[in-house]
Image: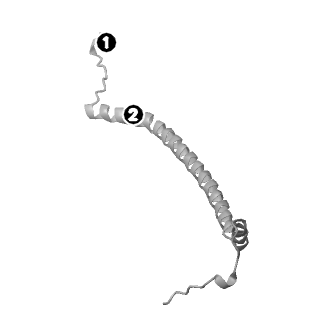
Amino acid sequence: MKKRNQKKKVSKTSKFERLLYTFALLLLVIAPVTVVFSKATLAKVNFEVEKQKKAIDAQKKTNESLAMAIDELASLTKIQEVAEEQGLSYNNSNIKTVEEDR
């Protein structure tokens, strides 16, 4: 008869507490996944940035070499050489200097 007189302790949780526990559990599961995902995305972006930096450096080197080629082709000796190949002669007295009035 003791069994009938004994009362079972039943812990009743409210809907709010269950919701709170569920939210906490979801937060514990989702937080690490979010951190890993964000770090992977950051690593991908950093890789793309480094790739673009290398492309920019390569383009700068190309631009510098092209600027040097322009300077070589625009030099007085090269102009005289091309003029002689075309049958022209260099005459310093035919050169006129134009000055800008300010």
Rendered location of residue 12, percent (x, y) = 28, 27
Residue 71, above or below 48 = below
User: Hey, what amino acid is under mark 2?
Assistant: Leu
Left/right of residue 37 with respect to residue 91 in the rendered view: left
Q: Quadrant of the N terminus?
A: top left
Residue closest to the eye, 64 or 102: 102
Q: Residue visible at 70% across and 77% down?
A: 90
Mark 1 or 2, closer to the camera: 2
Secondary structure beneath label 1 = helix
Residue 15, above or below 97 = above
Residue closest to the eye, 48 or 40: 48
Left/right of residue 28 with respect to residue 68 in the rendered view: left
Give the CA distance from mark 1 to mark 2.
40 Å
Residue closest to the eye, 2 or 89: 89
Q: Residue furthest front?
A: 87
Residue under circle 2? Answer: 26
Secondary structure beneath label 2 = helix
Q: Quadrant of residue 56?
A: bottom right
Residue under circle 1? Answer: 3
Q: Residue visible at 64% across and 82% down?
A: 94
Q: Residue visible at 27% across and 15% down?
A: 5
User: Hey, what amino acid is under mark 1?
Assistant: Lys
